[in-house]
Amino acid sequence: MNRGGQWFAKFLFTGVLPILGLAVLAWLSHGPDWAWALAALAFACMALVRTRQLSLLAAWLDAPDGSELPDAGGAGGKVLRKLARKLRHDARSRQAVEERLRSFREAMDAVPDGLVILDSSHQIHWSNRAAGEHLGIRLPRDSGAIIEHLVRTPGFAEYLAGSDASAPFVLQSPAARTRVYTVRVVPLGERNKLLVSLDVTDARRVESMRSTFVANVSHELRTPLTVVSGFLEHFADDGVIDAEQRQQFARLMSDQTARMLTLVDDLLTLSRLEAEDAPASEEDVDMADLLAQLLAEGQSLSEGRHRLDVRCDGPAVRGNRKELHSAFGNLVSNAIRYTPAGGSIDIEWRVRDQVGAFSVRDSGVGIAAEHLPRVTERFYRVDRGRSRDTGGTGLGLAIVKHILLRHQASLAIESEVGEGSTFRVEFPAWRLKPAA
Ligand code: ADP
């Protein structure tokens, strides 16, 4: 017997048959009128109980989760309890599904790539947070919108319509024009598509910096190489140049070769600094000793054309001596190269407010304010001619910046055209090592 049959049999044996039995007994003892009256009363009571159970059910269904099902008693009450249990179980399952859906959405929003689900007519069904940043798509506002109506970059609609989705499409974000994204379309099921966008701004910037750098290096090497190859052609053409000319050419070639060597040296230094995050070794660098060395080297470079002064009033610095010597030496050499004869250069080391400051002040040509933020870039020169004439490679301050970064030190530049410049390097207190 199925469950419906079981319930009917129960209803028959516990409800209808006892009433009929009582009615038969009443018929036999008191006659048919009593029997009919008793049966009618019993059935009316049954109907009343059922009506009450139904109204309780109706009231409970209005708030199935919030309140306990009232005990209606009897077989009807059992039905209600079973129904309540089933509804509660359904509610719990729904809650679990919603919980899982929420976790899934949170995970998708944490993905850095933009994801958009499109149907066959390119209507937006769903998208994650990154798609909002990359493509300007926001849900629920844009749910159901045609994506081509939102992303209006020329060529995007053709890309979506095209069959070759393997190659990515490059676009600038409609939201932030400075960023670049690639978009790829992946088939999803029978008719839907998944659009994936990637932020490639940084990769593109690195790529462009790399190609600019290669172009700069090639350009820097090309000039001396052209000069040297020109002289070599003259040498090959024997008999055309006399001994004096030959000597002059050899000297000029040697200058150009030295220039190339300096450039290669600086490039190697830069690449080594970029390859490692921190100096290989550190020690307590005696600043009085280092400043004396800088003074001697400066005087030799200046050849008496400038007045050089040194003031040292501070402790040792924890760092790599070779690197600090290279950084400070670059600043001193710049001061000499960009200061006309008769000018002065002051080199100083002192501690103020627990900050160790190394500074090189010159009375040279100075730097206009608009150039200041860029002078530490590789190959950036304010005056290309002057830099070359004095043997500059355009990499000095880039090397200084890298070394200081590795020593958690900062570089500040104050300058005025025609008045001079001050390059100040500041070390954090923990790098200062007062004598024991
Ligand atoms: P360079 O080899 O050309 O000197 P740097 O990286 O050392 O390259 O310096 C970058 C540019 O900053 C220089 O070309 C120059 O224009 C400017 N500069 C650097 N130091 C000074 C200074 N002390 N006075 C004036 N200009 C300077």
Image (cartoon, rainbow, N blue to C red):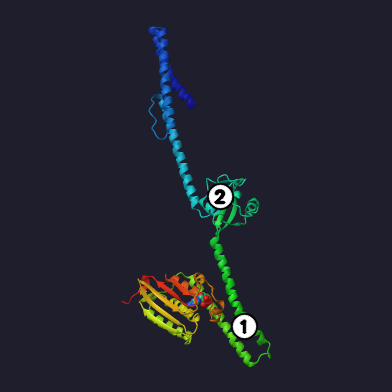
Instruction: Measuring from the top left, give residue 292's x and y in whole percent.
Output: 40, 83
Give how far apart the Cα atoms at labels 1 and 2 are. 59 Å
Instruction: Please state which amino acid type lies under the numbered disc 2.
Output: Val
Q: Nearer the viewer, residue 63 or 188?
A: 63
Taking the spot 41% from the left edge, 76% from the top edge, the residue there is 358
Crowding near pointer 1: few (<14 within 10 Å), some, many (20+)? Answer: some
Crowding near pointer 2: few (<14 within 10 Å), some, many (20+)? Answer: many
Considering only vertical position in the picture, is 240 above or below 26? below
* One can see residue 37 in this view: yes
**What residue is shown with label 2?**
116
Task: Name the quadrant containing residue 64.
Answer: top left
* One can see residue 278 in this view: no
Identify the secondary structure beneath mark 1: helix
Q: Nearer the viewer, residue 411 or 45?
A: 411
Q: Earlier in the sequence, mark 1 or mark 2?
A: 2
Q: Nearer the viewer, residue 183 or 4?
A: 183
Instruction: Measuring from the top left, give residue 408's x and y in whole percent.
Output: 42, 69
Image disc number at residue 228: 1
Considering only vertical position in the picture, is 63 above or below 282? above
